[in-house]
Amino acid sequence: MEFKKDNSFFSGRLKSFKYAIAGALKLITTEHSIMVQCSFGILVTIGGFYFDISKTDWLFQTLAIGLVLSAEGLNTAVEKIADFIHPDFHERIGFIKDIAAGAVFFAALTAFVIGLIIYLPLFL
């Protein structure tokens, strides 16, 4: 595949947006971890409407959902690249994949704490 630079700012941004949407759809429709995280995001969004959370809570909740989905997407990219470079098990590749998964863990843990801060007082 030959690289062809797009010299037009607007059409270049439009193409980038198109590729980003295509990538997001691929993630949502093919990766189980993203499907699970999207489900959690939808559930807490419904919870936000149900409990009528504050504007600040919405900001934190939205940021947490975006953080987790972004981390999951980057983790998937790291795993796919690692599998492409070295399809067989290799200790170093496993180490790299574990680190990427650890980053997702930190994002998910942060989102969980944010969820507790927002919703726990509503249940108590």
Image (cartoon, rainbow, N blue to C red):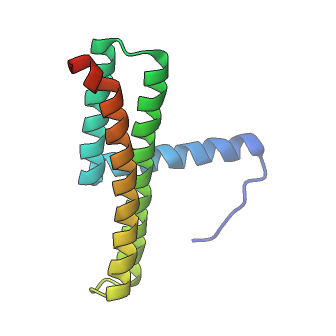
Considering depth in this image, is 59 or 34 the residue closer to the camera? Answer: 59
Residue 89, relative to residue 80: is it above or below?
below
Residue at far left of view: 123
Residue 42, relative to residue 95: is it above or below?
above
Please state the horizontal and vertical placement of residue 111, each as a whole percent of the image.
36, 41
Q: Residue at x 65, y 67 (%)?
A: 3
Considering depth in this image, is 115 or 91 the residue closer to the camera? Answer: 115
Quadrant housing residue 9: top right
Q: Residue at x 48, y 17 (%)?
A: 55
Q: Residue at x 34, y 71 (%)?
A: 98
Residue 61 visible here: yes
Left or right of residue 73: residue 4: right
Considering depth in this image, is 29 or 101 the residue closer to the camera? Answer: 101
Image quadrant occupied by the C terminus: top left
Please state the horizontal and vertical placement of residue 50, each as a whole percent of the image.
27, 13
Left or right of residue 43: residue 84: right
Quadrant housing residue 74: bottom left
